[in-house]
Image: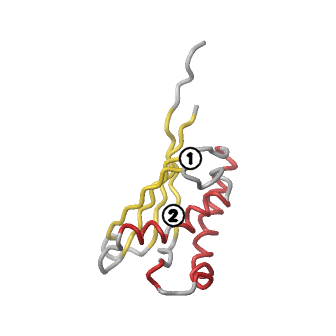
Amino acid sequence: MPELATRTKTLILRASGIPVGPNSRLHWAARHRLNAPLRDEVAWQAKWFAERHGTFAHAAVRIVLLRVGGSAMDPDNAIACCKGLVDGLVRGGLLVDDKRENITLTVDQEKAARGGTRGARLEVSVEVG
């Protein structure tokens, strides 16, 4: 039986802001409420992609946080503040779950271009058969 060729497809999603991280010292419910619009923004984009490409059991997700000024977050805080964005991928139906078996997550930080805005770029790479 011939082997099916697989190729990688990368979907780019954007969030209009950077989620509030654990260092904000807010109560978890307040942080959840502030991050909900970004989660929903990603979920709607994920739903659009899922309707066209299907739901995936595994994906490599790279989140790039674009900051305007100041110093970069600690790596552990950067990962923690992205939970809502990953939840949006699941809520939108693009990923089955956000368990370790279903997602390989990488979080990077970049300085936005001069005059640019804060935000996040999600690069979701999936194997398509």
Q: Is residue 69 left or right of residue 58?
A: left
- In the figure, is residue 1 to the left or right of 71? right
The residue where tag 1 is placed is 101
Circle 1: residue type: Glu
**Image: 23 above or below 14:** below
Q: Earlier in the sequence, mark 2 or mark 1?
A: 2
Reply above or below: 90 against 75.
above
Residue 33 x/y as whole percent: 62, 81
Name the image quarter holding residue 28: bottom right
Question: Residue placed at 55% from the left, 65% from the top?
Answer: 85
- Closer to the camera in the image, 110 or 60: 60
**Residue under label 2:** 14
Query: Which dot marks residue 126?
Result: none
Compared to 25, does 48 lie above or below? above
- Quadrant in the picture for residue 116: bottom left
Q: Secondary structure at mark 1?
A: loop
Q: Position of residue 11 (x, y in %)?
A: 52, 50
